[in-house]
Image: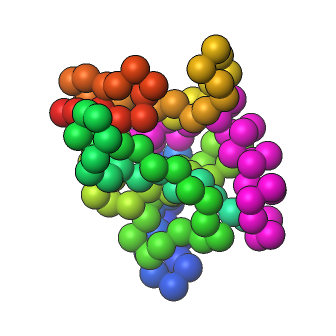
Amino acid sequence: MSLLGFFGGVIRFVNVMTDSPLIVTASAARRIVSAAKKHSKASDAVLRVAVQGGGCQGFSYVFSFEDSPAEDDTVVQQDDAKVIVDPSSLELLRGSRLDFVQDLMGARFQIDNPQATSSCGCGTSFSL
């Protein structure tokens, strides 16, 4: 089920239970909400997940907080957390799982991308 929202343009909202192009875990959702409060004065700050060329495997994940989505972003909502993805990155992230992990390497957002054929040891870059 998709919902359309109008905020100066059409933004695609998705129901994470049925047709989400990106799965956001409960752990990631909690961390997004707490980090957004620290990084932005806006109460509705969202986490942007993007893919850019570069990194040791060809593509790298980029995370940033923004006050609002762009006109053509897809918004994935899990509990109170909102994640936005631009159309180009969405194609490379489709079917991925966004998690927040804490281990010996530290605390970080981690993406499990089924489209990736390989990824670096720290999980910040991948190849197709």
Relative placement, left or right, of 67 versus 90 is: right
Q: Position of residue 20 (x, y in %)?
A: 45, 41
Q: Which residue is rendered at x = 59% and y = 20% of the image? A: 105
Display coloring: rainbow
Q: Position of residue 84 (x, y in %)?
A: 51, 57
Residue 36 can be seen in this image: yes
Q: Which residue is rendered at x = 80% and y = 69% of the image? A: 41
Q: Which residue is rendered at x = 52% and y = 50% of the image? A: 63
Q: Quadrant of residue 10?
A: bottom left
Quadrant of the rendering where the C terminus is positioned: top left
Relative placement, left or right, of 76 versus 53 is: right
Task: Give the residues in magenta.
Answer: 16-43
Q: Position of residue 1 (x, y in %)?
A: 46, 48
Relative placement, left or right, of 7 versus 107 is: left
Count of picture labels = 0
As for residue 38 lying within the magenta part, the answer is yes
Q: Is residue 70 above or below residue 120?
A: below
Furthest residue to the front? Answer: 56
Q: Which residue is rendered at x = 26% and y = 28% of the image? A: 116
Relative placement, left or right, of 43 versus 6 is: right
As for residue 105 lying within the magenta part, the answer is no
Q: Position of residue 109 (x, y in %)?
A: 57, 35
Q: Is residue 27 above or below residue 88?
A: above
